Image: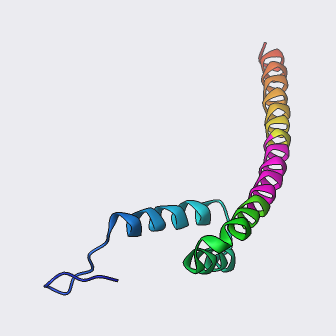
Amino acid sequence: MNRNKSGIRDYTEEDCRWVEFIKCMRSVGLQVEVLIEYVALFQLGDETLEARKELLIEQRKQLAAKMEEMEKTLERLDSKITRYEQAVVVKERLLKRTDN
């Protein structure tokens, strides 16, 4: 890591892109070990292009499966919420009848 004359870290544009990439990948649940492997492959140079691509393809598959599962869970929650809302409406109608 480069430092300026005052000893403060001096991040390059490339450093910032790496940080953004890592933060993005971590935010969707990629494991640190996968990212370490990816960076290690990157540092080995162009002869690892195919390996890096395959690693990213595998992570994409896992993320897509996770998103599909989350979508199912979201639909289930929506259904449950709708049933609660319907139950509240029925209860309110019953209360109005007994008030009269």
Residue at 71% across / 62% down in the picture? 53
Residue at 73% across / 70% down in the picture? 51
Q: Position of residue 37 (x, y in %)?
A: 66, 79
The image quarter in which residue 61 lies: bottom right
The image quarter in which residue 24 lies: bottom right
Up the image or down, 84 lies above or below 8; here it is: above
The colouring scheme, among rainbow, by chain, secondary structure or one colour, is rainbow
Q: Position of residue 93 (x, y in %)?
A: 81, 19
Q: Quadrant of the N terminus?
A: bottom left
Q: Per the image, is 60 magenta?
A: yes
Up the image or down, 20 lies above or below 86; here it is: below
Q: Position of residue 63 (x, y in %)?
A: 75, 56
Q: Per the image, is 62 magenta?
A: yes
Residue toward you, 80 or 85: 80
Q: How many marks?
A: 0
Residue at 85% across / 44% down in the picture? 72
In the image, the segment drawn in magenta is: 59-74
Answer left or right for 70 relative to 7. right
